[in-house]
Image (spheres, helix red, strand yellow):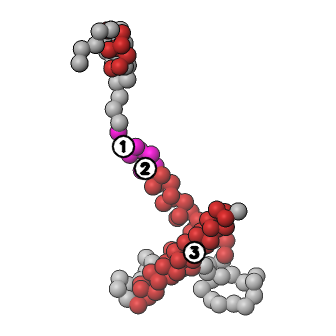
Amino acid sequence: MPCPNPCAKQASHSERPNGKPRFSFYFQPPLREFSAAFLLGLGRAFGETMIVLMATGNAALLSGSLFDPVRTMSATIGAEMAEVVFGDAHYNVLFFIGVCLFVFSFTLNAVAEFIVRSV
């Protein structure tokens, strides 16, 4: 469809008066941002695991006292995964601990989201 007004044509194409486009970029997926978010999340997961290992004393013994060193579930996975034989029962138990952690945190987040949305 011919345009009777050349200014309207330039405006519709977002062009400058010299004919060059105003915006000379195209859409790219934000790969840098996704990779940065992935690396930050991975670093946070490793960092929190190492902090928990150091703060709790990393003792693999069960104790009745609150002041004795303990080993958390995430610290157990982090400390023992490199030493376990692939496919062994110990390997499967470590993955079961991971599934338990996931279910617990997912349930806790779902309950918190439900409470926040209902208030």
Question: Can residue 116 be seen?
Answer: yes
Q: Is residue 21 magenta?
A: no
> Residue 90: x, y in percent?
44, 88
Q: CA distance from mark 1 to mark 3?
A: 33 Å
- Looking at the rendering, which quadrant does residue 17 occupy? top left
Looking at the image, which residue is at 42% across and 50% down? 35
Query: Which amino acid, by three-letter code, is at mark 3?
Result: Thr
Query: Which amino acid, by three-letter code, is at mark 1?
Result: Pro
Q: State the SS at label 1.
A: loop
Name the side, left or right, on which 118 lies relative to 79.
right
> Residue 55: x, y in percent?
67, 71
Sequence-first tag of 3 and 2: 2
> Residue 28: x, y in percent?
35, 39
Q: Which mark is residue 34?
A: 2
Q: Which residue is mark 1?
A: 29
User: Does residue 67 sit above or below 9 in this rendering?
Assistant: below
